[in-house]
Amino acid sequence: MRRRVVDFIHRISYATLFAMVGWYSCVMPPERAWQAAVQKVLCYALTYPPAVVSQLTYPLSGMDLFFTRGSTWCDFCSPQDFFWYHLRFAVPVYVALFYVPTFLRFAARRDKRLFKRIMIGLLIYVVTTTIFFAVTSGSDRRGDIRIAALWFVILSGASAFGWSRLDEKLKAFGVAGVILIGAWPFSYLMTFIAPKVDGIHIGYYIANLFVLTVGVTFVLGMTWLAEYVLRRLRERSVAKA
């Protein structure tokens, strides 16, 4: 217990440091040319994770240089408010990110098969999302981030049920429940992104329900297929040896 508390304090300290360095690099004018290059890299690199997360938590956000389209995210704020609003949002984001490797190590030690499924599923999600938005997206990168993040949440919930040790019927009900619930915020999100969608209607909900069903089935099915192929290849290599 003591070790967990110490680790949590360390993560808060590092998160605060990252947030402060990102804020300083963005707002403080550099004195030399090499400082300008370093500050630019630090500014964009350290403010990107909070900016992405803020697309799902609007109006609560931190410093956003990527999706505000030229407008400021903190109009009429004093320098003190500017600094406080950024830290208040960025520190929890970084703390959560710092716990991701811990969760992956825990999953790898407890259930190697589950860890392998998580890695395969993440790879499929990243590849398919990148290809889809590279082919279909326009200039609305903020909308792309929101859709990709919501897809990640829905796929994570469906995978949690699909890869659990529950009874097969409970797994099916759990995955179906995630899709049914997920179609509602997905439809609500589209009212902010698609200009022709002026409200949530039953037709839009059914269409999004179909899209989510196909997407969840594809990711879970491709994960199972990749796991099956890897297992067969391993069995063949062992048989040849």
Image (cartoon, rainbow, N blue to C red):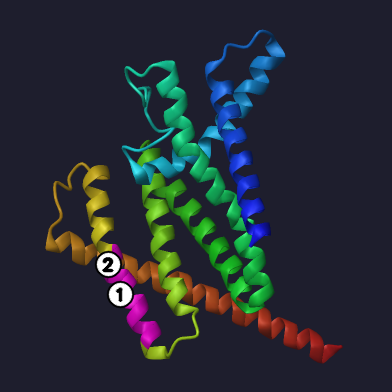
* Residue 139 in sight here: yes
The residue at the point 41 percent across, 71 percent down is 158
* Left or right: residue 162 compared with residue 105: left
Magenta stretch: includes residue 181? yes
State the residue lying farthest toward the right. 241
**Relative to residue 110, is residue 136 depicted above or below?**
above
Find the residue positioned furthest to the front: 2
Query: What residue appears at the point 51 percent right and 73 percent down from the top-left corner?
Result: 222
CB under 8 Å between discs 1 and 2 = yes
In the displayed structure image, the side of residue 76 where residue 30 appears, left or right:
right
Circle 2 sits on which residue?
A: 181
Question: Picture coordinates of residue 172 (x, y %)?
Answer: 36, 83
Residue at 46% across / 31% down in the picture? 86
Q: Which residue is mark 1?
A: 177
**Identity of the residue drawn at 26% across and 70% down:** 180
| Amino acid type at mark 2 | Ile
Position of residue 184 measured from the top left corner of the image (x, y, whole percent):
23, 61
**Number of numbered discs:** 2
Density class for disc 2 (Cα within 10 Å; few <14, some 14-19, many ≥20) is: few
Q: Picture coordinates of residue 196 (x, y %)?
A: 17, 45
Q: Quadrant of the N terminus?
A: bottom right
Magenta-colored span: 170-182
Q: Secondary structure at mark 2?
A: helix
